[in-house]
Image (cartoon, rainbow, N blue to C red):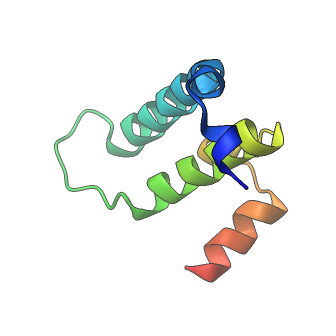
C-alpha cells in the first residue's frame, strides 16, 4: 500500500523539504551549544526533526517544533517519550 509513495521521483520532490528541516535541526543544535564544546543529548532535537519531517513531507504542515513553538502534535510526541 505504501510502496507507490516511495518512488524515486517523489523522494526527489521531497528533497527541498528534507534540506529545510536538516538546516533547522543544525540551527537548533548550534543555538543549544553556542560556541562551547559540550555533550549534547540528541534525543529531543532528533525527535523534533522527525516530527517536523513527517509534518512537512507527509501532511504539508509546519509544526515549528525545531523553533520551539508549542504545537499539539509536538506535545503528544513528547508525552510518548
The residue depicted at 81 percent of the width and 44 percent of the height is: 59
Nearest to the observer: residue 52 or residue 66? 52
Residue 52, position as x, y percentages in the image: 65, 45
11 to 73, vertically: above or below: above
The residue depicted at 32 percent of the width and 43 percent of the height is: 33
Nearest to the observer: residue 32 or residue 49? 49
Residue 65, position as x, y percentages in the image: 66, 49
The residue depicted at 55 percent of the width and 25 percent of the height is: 8
Q: Quadrant of the C terminus?
A: bottom right
Nearest to the observer: residue 28 or residue 1? 1
Q: Is residue 23 left or right of residue 4?
A: left
Residue 38, position as x, y percentages in the image: 19, 51
Count all numbered tags in the image, as a single digit. Answer: 0
Q: Is residue 68 visible?
A: no
27 to 73, vertically: above or below: above
Q: Quadrant of the N terminus?
A: bottom right
Q: Is residue 60 left or right of residue 3?
A: right
Q: Residue furthest bottom?
A: 80
Where, by quadrant of the figure, is residue 39 drawn? Answer: bottom left
Q: Is residue 3 visible?
A: yes
Amino acid at each position: 500500500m505504501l510502496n507507490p509513495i516511495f518512488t524515486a521521483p517523489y523522494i526527489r520532490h521531497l528533497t527541498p523539504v528534507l534540506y529545510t528541516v536538516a538546516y533547522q535541526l543544525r540551527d537548533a543544535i548550534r543555538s543549544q551549544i553556542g560556541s562551547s564544546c559540550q555533550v549534547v543529548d540528541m534525543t529531543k532535537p532528533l525527535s523534533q526533526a522527525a516530527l517536523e519531517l513527517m509534518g512537512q513531507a507527509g501532511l504539508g504542515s509546519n509544526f515549528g517544533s525545531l523553533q520551539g513553538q508549542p504545537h499539539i502534535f509536538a506535545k503528544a510526541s513528547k508525552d510518548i517519550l
